Every structure is written in structure tokens, then in C-alpha cells.
Image (spheres, rainbow, N blue to C red):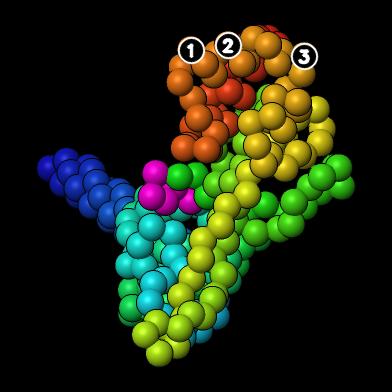
Amino acid sequence: MKRAFLLYFSIFFGGFLLAQDLRQQMIDQSAAAYLEMVDEESALYYGHLQEELPRTVNHPYLADQRYVQARLSYLGVVYPEAMLRLDLLRHELVVLSPDRSHVVLFPENVDYAELHYRRVIFFQPDNLPGAPSNGYYFLLHSGDCKVMEKRTASLNRRNNLGAWEDFYIMSARFYLYKDSAYHTVRSKSGLLKTLQPYKKELKRFISANHLSFRKNQEEFLVRTVEEYEKLSGSD
């Protein structure tokens, strides 16, 4: 009887200890996951606050001055619902923190952001010929060739019925990476010259698909470069 009681006690107590160990492991794992999450978010919201802009007629942000939910990869960590806006005047990607602060992200830590249906990257110049300056770019196409767009807002002033007012003008520049060099694309003819030796074939493709560099530069560049990659066998 005594032996049976001891056996029962050891099984019960051993099971109790095992349950306690498992419970503690779960608590430890949850705590570790929480601390990791907090540490990641603290890295995201660590930076200087965005300076206020002067009062103007319009704004210098991509699409909207309000924050929008976006997918962000920062220091290798993906945040699927980060609240972002892109300042095209100062080329700053800004995140809205939980306490409603406007925090400027460190650009070198930004892997990419998917914002307003665009893939935004921070480009740092390399030693290749024609490399553009550093800043945030839209990666429009990424294959054997790459198509990038850089938008910039510049502050201007005008006289409106005797009163001076400030406003922003938006401009865009397009870049093609091909054969270990960058090319600034300013026209249809300039692009076709870069995409030799398929100039005639690409002209037929452009005409058949009713593409216009003047009306829609982004579509024109992306579709023409994609066709070039098919022709050259590099897609």
C-alpha cells in the first residue's frame, strides 16, 4: 500500500512539475517574443522628428499628405501595416508612431516600402557610369534591366491677385540600368537608342500597343523595356 502511494505521488508530482515546466516555457517564449517585438518597433520609431513645412497652396508628399497604411521592410524586418508618407521635397520617408509623432526613418535602413501602389527604395550611388544621386526612387521594373523614377518637389512663389503665395512643383526623372551603366531617359528616341539593336522591333511594338512617352512615361518605359528583354532573351 505504501509503495503504491509513493508511486502515485511520484507520478502525480512529476506530472505537476512537467506541467509547470511547460507552462514556464510558454511564458518565457511569449515574453521573449514580446521583447523582440518591442525591440523591433523601438528601432522603427527611433529617429529625429520631421520639421514642419511652411504654409503653402499644395503639399510636397507622394499622392497624399495624410499617412496611409503601407508595407515596410526596415532593417530586414517587415511591417505589413506601417503608417507612412513620403516627403518629396526633403526626400524623407516618415512613419507615424503610436504616440502620433512624425518620425523620419533612417534611409540607409529602409529595404523597401510598398506605398501608393509603388515600390519605394533608397538608392545609394555606386561606381557605375551614370549613377544618379542618392535618394528615394520608385523601382518601376526590376529584371536584367531596371527602370527607376525619382520624383522631386520644389518650392516656388507666385503672385495671385496681388498676394504672394508659395506652392510646390513636381518633377520626375527616369533612369534605365542596362549593361552595368545607368542612362537618364528623357525621350522616346533616347530610350530606343539605348535599347539597341532592337530599335525597329521596338518601334513596331510601341505602335501596335499605342504607347505614348508623352502621355504616360511610366507605362511606356516599363512595357518597352519588358519587350526589349524578351527580344534579347534576358527576361
Which amino acid type is marked by label 1? Ala
What residue is at 75 percent from the left and 26 percent from the top? 193
Q: Position of residue 226 (x, y in %)?
A: 58, 21
Q: Residues within 10 Å of mark 2 (few under 14, many from 20)?
A: few
Q: Position of residue 137 (x, y in %)?
A: 59, 51
Closest to the observer: 63 or 46?
63
- Tell me the residue that label 1 is attached to: 208
Q: Residues within 10 Å of mark 1 (few under 14, many from 20)?
A: few
Which amino acid type is marked by label 3? Pro
Q: Disc 1 and disc 3: Cα gap in Å?
A: 19 Å
Q: Are marks 1 and 2 in contact (CB under 8 Å)?
A: yes
Residue 27 found in image quarter? bottom left
> What numbered label is drawn on residue 197?
3
Image vertical order of residue 10 relative to residue 207, above or below: below
Q: Disc 1 and disc 2: Cα gap in Å?
A: 6 Å
Q: Residues within 10 Å of mark 3 (few under 14, many from 20)?
A: few
- Tell me the residue that label 2 is attached to: 204
Q: Position of residue 65 (x, y in %)?
A: 36, 68
Residue bounds of the magenta highlight: 113-117
Which amino acid type is marked by label 2? Arg
Task: Specify whether residue 164 is in view.
Answer: yes
